Amino acid sequence: MHVDMNAFFASVEQQVNPSLRHRPIAVIGAHKRTVITTASYEARAYGVKVGMTVPEAKKLCPDIIFVAGDNKRYTDTCTRLVRLYTNYTPLVEVYSIDEAFLDIMGSLCLFNSPEDIALQIKRKIRKNFGLTCSIGVGSNKLLAKLASNMKKPDGLTIIHPEDVSEILEKLPVSTLCGIGSRLEMHLEAMGVKTCGELGRFPVKELKRKFGIIGERLHQMGLGIDESPVVPVEDEPDAKSVGHSMTLDKDISDNESIERYILQLSEMVGRRLRRGQYSGRTVALTLRYSNFHTFTKRRTIKEYINGDFDIYLVSLDVLRLIRLKYAVRLLGVSISNLVKDYGQIPLFKKDRDRQSVVQTMDEINDRYGEFSITRARLLDRYPHKGVIAPAWRPAGVRRVNYQ
Amino acid sequence: MKIKCNKEDIKKGFHIVECNASGSNIRPILQNVKITAKNNTLELSTTDLEVSISYVVDSVEVIEPGVVVCPEVKVASIVKEWSEDCIEITEENRICSITGKGSYFKILCMDPEEFPAIPQFTNENYIEIDKANLTEMVRKTAFILSGEKAKHGSNGVFLDVNKNRAKMVANDGRRLAEIKRKIDNPNGLRNSCIIPIKGILQVLRMLSDHDEIIKIRIEERRVFVRTEKSTLCSQLIEGQYPEYEEVIPTNLDKRITLDKRTFFSAVRRGSVMTTEEYKLLRFKILENLLELRCTSPDVGEAKVEMPIEYSGEGLEIGLNPDYILDFLKVVDTDKVGLELKDHSTAGVFKAGNDYTYVVMPMSLEGS
């Protein structure tokens, strides 16, 4: 079963602020070079789409209301939604912030039918959150997602096994999750336009052209998908933790670059400590104004998770780089992670520093990020960005703020 | 310049100066060796601006004195592979020629003017130390800092000279080693400095096999270490060395004497189950028994027991076995003392005279 929240960010904002309900709104980022991340269905009626810039949307829909996104609101809602899903099955895979897969095979003896579960979930989401969703039910993830996409908003579509081949026959390949525009182009060049054609296309040819995914494409054409629903707790441990951000404007002076790095280090350190991780390879990513992007890293002997330690190592890396152009994007990430690294420092001043960091974490946990921070970051860059597809209700994962 | 000398003598010189002129240096001139011929001696010098080393080869037949600066790697490889006993080096018009019976090499040289000045040892206000003592001091402290860079701010080895004693200390923020040895200090100098790890490892390299007395002179920004034939000068790390004495606990009430070989083997066996990610080895002290346990989440578990003489209160403490093995590797006594207090206070190892090794424990909570 696939649950897809309709116009998630916009709907949440409309719930929070009743004056926005039934009006065309668009959720945007907080900074200057932002784009629309979600438009309400009212705004979509005017042709406003995700990814448009503010002036573009304004032109199509003069009455549109722009709302700066509040990530915390969405992640909180998502966490609560996941809790609701787990009333029906423990196997919940959070696919992105507004989509989830539920494996309900084992729950059918408790609840009558998939349709019953779907209706109950829809009813509860509407009652408890005031939100609508589209649910698709199918015998695997591929078909469930396909089904939920068939009717939006507020849909419920069930694809029965006996109807699969009929539905797929005329369906354009690009409607399948996992086939993007480039792949579609390649397939079209081979004379494959619909899923039915894809399923009948010789596997050998597909493998020759696309390598290992050829086999997978063939199965997709037939509506076969054997990938399991992976609950959050079963996902492999994080390999690295990182943040990056596109700057308000291109910068080239070291002072500002260092301050952004300090801010990123603080964000990385926070997430690292939340998962009880420590790491010893720090990587710095830079994108020049000409979009040339590169990463340099340094490995140290000791595992660290303090903001300032990460910052100092990042600065060491920065010193290895001779800046050629103004910088557009900066990223700090840390890898080579260990969990629960318990080595106690020798010197009291280091132990004191750990206690300060811990106390700051507790304050920020309670009153929100950057409630307490270094004085140097007081006029920091507002970092409300977009929640990346990699966001999960629990655990650590790499997130990019664009 | 034109000289003739014994091949073995000059080969030894190159061995001592060579690793300072590594190819990784950004300034090409620093990949060269400066050869100065005068008064029947030949002086070889290399520098990377942080550490410089010179070595004097004596009883050389100097036919024409002079200075030549040429690529260290090239000359050293020629000298190493030289098959005759005697070697002849001449320089003319910035071309250095090395000639033997059936072979010759001509190497293009650099302008000697471009080579940085090599600091000269001033023969006053120095202390003297026995070679064996100095080697021991370096060997028993510097191991903490070798390998990858620790945290930010490269650490060096702290050298403290006071009256007739010298102290050497190294720490990496989690463990610390301190060693004290006797010195000869006729002028009653009192001084201290932080020597970068690079410089201190070079000291170890340049100390020759036969016994001798070594002179150390600490200046404001640099330190000299001089043996009979070679001189090393290292820049110092600026700043104050941390108040390290405060991390050596004095109120430790649980004392055990361990047999080094048995303990070494027990720790080695116990550490088999640790991984790069999981380093916690639990040391449990019971009556007349030391129990080592490791439960590594992805690997498995181990328990190793060894008999000890102990009759006090029991204790469990988590330590990184690598730190203990590092220490045991440099220890040359049969017995090792271990003093502890509780699971969150540093443990102190003692081996022989005036050698103390402090290890901070790992937290036992959360796992």
Image (cartoon, coloured by chain):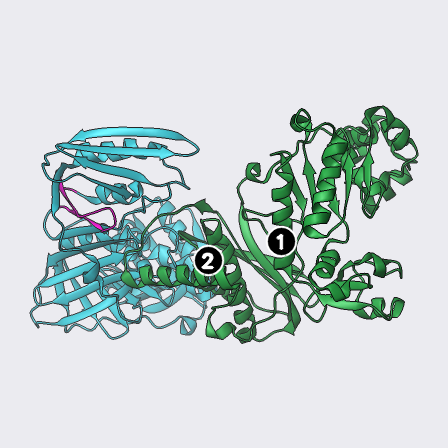
Range of residues picked out in magenta = B332-351
Mark 1 residue crowding within 10 angstroms, few (<14) / some (14–19) / many (20+): some
Mark 2 residue crowding within 10 angstroms, few (<14) / some (14–19) / many (20+): few
Return the x and y of residue A2 as percentages of the image width and height.
73, 38
Q: Amino acid at mark 2?
A: Ser
Magenta span contains residue A198: no
Residue appearing at x 54%, y 46% in the figure: A395
B32 vs A68, left or right, is left
Q: In the picture, one chain is cyan; tell me its letter.
A: B
Q: Is residue B40 visible?
A: yes
Q: Nearer the viewer, residue A150 or B78?
A: A150
Return the x and y of residue B335 as percentages of the image width and height.
12, 39
Q: Amino acid at mark 1?
A: Thr
A395 vs A200, left or right, is left
Residue appearing at x 83%, y 46% in the figure: A152
Q: In this figure, which residue is indicated by the disc labeled 2?
A: B24
Q: Nearer the viewer, residue B185 or A16?
A: A16
B2 vs B263, left or right, is right
Q: Nearer the viewer, residue B119 or B3?
A: B119
- Callout 1: chain: A
**What shade does chain A have?**
green
Cβ atoms under marks 1 and 2 closer than 8 Å: no
As drawn, A207 above or below A281 = above
Q: In this figure, which residue is indicated by the disc labeled 1?
A: A75
Q: Nearer the viewer, residue A210 or A164?
A: A164
Quadrant for the N terminus of chain A in the image? top right
Do marks 1 and 2 share a chain? no
- Callout 2: chain: B
Q: Is residue B39 visible?
A: no
Q: What SS does tag 2 mark?
A: loop
Return the x and y of residue B71 as percentages of the image width and height.
43, 59
